[in-house]
Image: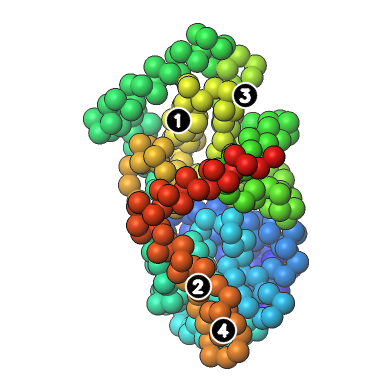
Amino acid sequence: MRVLGPEELGEGDRERWRELRAVSKAPRNPFMEPEFSVAVARVRPRARVAVLYEGASPAGFLPYERGVLGQGRAIGLGVSDCQGAVLAPGTAVEAGELLRGCAVSSFAFDNLEAGQGLFTPYAAERHATYVIDVEKGYASYESALRTRSPKFLRTTLAKERRLGRQVGAVRFVFDERDPAALGTLIGWKSAQYRRTGRRDRFAREWIARLVGRLAETRSAQCAGTLSVLYAGDRPVAAHFGLRSASVLACWFPAYDPEFAKYSPGLVLHLRMAGAAAAEGIGLLDMGRGPAEYKDSLKTGELTVYEGTATRPGVGSALHRLGREPARRAHGFVRTRPRLAALAARALKGAGRLRP
């Protein structure tokens, strides 16, 4: 095994990584591609990749970040929506041995991909990630929506028509290249975070820089994709995510609150589903975390895991002391709907007090 920075991987190594993802039974999520790890490495200097070998050929890759105290975490933890190792089928490796080779005492994850047998024994929680399946085409998806949620679909389409009449002709761009549109989306999203009492992710420099780099990434299996819904010449909703040839990973959706009565975010997601299907993309992954719009749009759910793999030592003990109390408190609130609703209202109240 050797450990190096993601940007130090040769093209042969990256191609081997892609080959292993291609034969995996998991959806081809772009967060699990080498391009994402390389982008993170350019804004997070402690990003690393462990390369496992069988003979002279790479048999696996583990992208991760190493903390100053030797604690490890999934690469891009906090923003990456799919995490884990990329291993050849049948590769025999033990988690503690791998962590030792990486010179870390732990490996924290919050969106561990299902089927990651190396790390799932260390999962403390499992979560649903909500998906839209358009493998059979958008018409099939819309027909299923019409059967399952006829009022939702009818109302959303009616609002789209009203938006066109009252504001301006509705236009959708699946892959918008205008940097100003990305800036508009980031402004909306930052305001949404503050309004709902949550931490503004874009106030963290490395996240803003990472999104900027990924917006310029154009690989077949990991491409930054900015989708924008316009009414007339005015953007009213937008989304930035990553796509592979078969999966659109939904990441940062937002809309202009001035047009909230038209539900532009829902209209945007329907248009994204249609455009993705036309591009041959079969799955939109809306990520973990319950939301009313996800319940309305989803066709199913996948499973991701949260937890920490550790090996014996002081470092793992420090990790448990530092993270476990907060994680357990969040889990306690999340599994009690009334308490979760009170917490959400408290966050929104705090958001209204912010300047």
Q: Earlier in the sequence, mark 1 or mark 2?
A: 1
- The disc placed on residue 235 is 3
Q: Quadrant of residue 274?
A: top left
Tag in front: 2 or 4? 2
The residue identified by callout 1 is: 266
Please name the amino acid that badge 3 sits on. Answer: Pro
Q: Are marks 3 and 4 in contact (CB under 8 Å)?
A: no
Q: Are marks 1 and 4 in contact (CB under 8 Å)?
A: no
Q: Which residue is mark 4?
A: 316
Relative to 284, is 171 above or below? Answer: above
Name the mark nearer the viewer: 1 or 2.
2
Instruction: Give left or right: position of 339 versus 353.
Output: left
Is residue 179 among the parts visible in the rendering?
yes
In contact (CB < 8 Å): disc 2 and disc 3: no
> At numbered mark 2, what does the secondary structure look like: helix, strand or loop?
helix
Is 132 rendered above or below residue 178?
below
